[in-house]
Amino acid sequence: MNREDHLIAQLSNVCDIVETDTSVLQAKTLDFWPFAMLEAGASERYPAPTAVVKPTNTNEVAAVLSLLNSVGVPVVAQGGRSGVCGGSVPIFGGVCMDLTAMKGIVSLDKDSCVAEVKAGTFGNDLEQELEEKAGMTLGHWPQSIEISTVGGWVACRSSGQYSTRYGKIEDMITGLEVVLADGTIVHTGNNAPRSAMGGDLTQLFVGSEGTLGVITKAELRIWHLPKSEWRRAYLWPSFEEGLDACRRILQRHATPAVLRLYDKTESSFHFSLSDRCLLLALDEGDPAIVSATMQVVEEECSSAERAEESLVARWLENRNDISAMAKWLEAGMMVDTIEIAARWSALPRIHRKITSRLASLNGVLSTSAHQSHAYPDGACIYYTIIGKRNEYSDDQPSAIRVDRTFSSPNQVLYIEIWDTVMNTVLEERGAISHHHGIGLNRARFMRSALGEGFNVLTRLKSSLDPRGILNPGKLGLPSPFGEPAWPF
Ligand SMILES: Cc1cc2nc3c(=O)[nH]c(=O)nc-3n(C[C@H](O)[C@H](O)[C@H](O)COP(=O)(O)OP(=O)(O)OC[C@H]3O[C@@H](n4cnc5c(N)ncnc54)[C@H](O)[C@@H]3O)c2cc1C
């Protein structure tokens, strides 16, 4: 028996579902990372995993991890593989752990409004179960709700479209069940809303992208279904003026569930508006809170032009439609989205620099932006960049490797765009990601982004996962299996 067959036999002893079909293994080698989509056959750039395990309970997760830790084989936790940064790509082969058989609500504490949910539960299934069982909602509505899981949200610090009212996923979590690399099962959260019992172990694992442990359950704050809803739309002459209105609204402590500001390009593309920036506002919940929120929004937008409220309905109808992206890719274009965050004091400057620097890159055809997650101290700006590079050129900035590692000039353009945006944000001390996470794509910026904090993260990693088996090569952390073969 060769080494791989021996591993598969060992895995079968501890987990009921072990898949080894070539088609299943190949399918698990990619997620929604657009860079890989720019190349036919990108799934063959990395070794296919030896096996896919599909545990149905926490004990199976623990037994698999304990086994893989003892033999030093890498393992990548996978939810819906909707991540857009290559986070769940098994770059060193090994084993993929598909969590999607661990699904559903485990318990509901209706008095406390807390639900305990298995990590592999897909978003729309969770919302449906919450509504049917309790008339409640989590209020987390990422665009990828149908194809992403609770574990993936927690692992990537996800944000939904109603985040200004309900918060990001890290605000919704009261506790976690996590399995460490050696198979130890840990519970965090202490069944209490807050505590003063040392550092927050829950938040240690939030955003860890499968590198510190496998999340098997999450306790989440849930809400009664909203009794009222309110919508408005406004037009601003400039993106900066709209941003400033968002700042004032948040700083008056008003948190409308949706506060989305589109720049002129996106206002035109999505809503056929010319030369103005559309601000959509929607709130839901208790009528008294919604009414007070509405009053603040109206006061702060009194100098803007009112637009048809039907624009909000139009957004609601189309908000999860990403068909345009597929069309651009099919037409041979490069397309990606980049979300960053910064303080209000820096945001307009960052935005100006990013748009002007991208416009000067050879092949960039369009850069557009919207603001969709706002806080009292700052906001997220979400860029959509479209381009086409027809040929390799010899005058690339020296930082870019043009050694034909990439199969297409669009991939070189892609790297240039990411370098430009990330370096601008680092220069202005913003956050290089607001909710998509790091994965493989942003790994090369992590050391600069975290400074000395990166060494703390490295030490945490080597303490919790000394053999480095958990999702090696991600978050920019050192890997005992070497450097990722491609693309960086
Ligand atoms: C069309 C589209 C729209 C999107 N819109 C949004 C959006 O509005 N908001 C948003 O936040 N994101 C969005 N995303 C990105 C993506 O959906 C999120 O990052 C999501 O949180 C990933 O969840 P997943 O279950 O698919 O995780 P995967 O892609 O499978 O995994 C992502 C990372 O999490 C780790 N991981 C997964 N499950 C576990 C677990 N149980 N334990 C430990 N680690 C785990 C993986 O190892 C990997 O590093 C979008 C993606 C697409 C394709």
Image (spheres, rainbow, N blue to C red):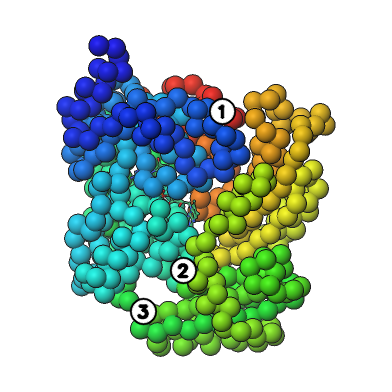
Between 15 and 205, the one lying in front of the other is 15
User: In the image, is 127 to the left or to the right of 382?
Assistant: left
Q: In the figure, residue 54 lies in which quadrant?
A: top left
376 shown above or below 402? below
The kind of residue tagged 1 is Trp
What residue sits 71% from the left and 47% below the top?
387
**N-terminal-most mark, 2 or 3:** 2
Q: CA distance from mark 2 to mark 3?
A: 12 Å
Residue 486: image tag? 1
User: In the image, is 384 to the left or to the right of 138?
Assistant: right
Q: In the figure, residue 167 lies in which quadrant?
A: bottom left
The image shows residue 239 at horizontal and vertical percentages of 70, 69
- Tag 1–tag 2 contact (CB < 8 Å): no
Residue 469 appears in the rendering: no
Between 283 and 133, the one lying in front of the other is 133
The image shows residue 205 at horizontal and vertical percentages of 37, 45
What residue sits 53% from the left and 68% below the top?
318
Q: Regarding mark 2 in the picture, which secondary structure is present there?
A: loop
Residue 283: image tag? none
The crowd level at tag 3 (other Cα within 10 Å; few <14, some 14-19, many 20+) is some
Q: Regarding mark 3 in the picture, which secondary structure is present there?
A: loop
The kind of residue tagged 2 is Tyr
**N-terminal-most mark, 1 or 3:** 3
Q: CA distance from mark 1 to mark 2?
A: 36 Å
User: In the image, is 84 to the left or to the right of 103?
Assistant: right
Q: Badge 2 is on which residue?
A: 162
Residue 226: image tag? 3
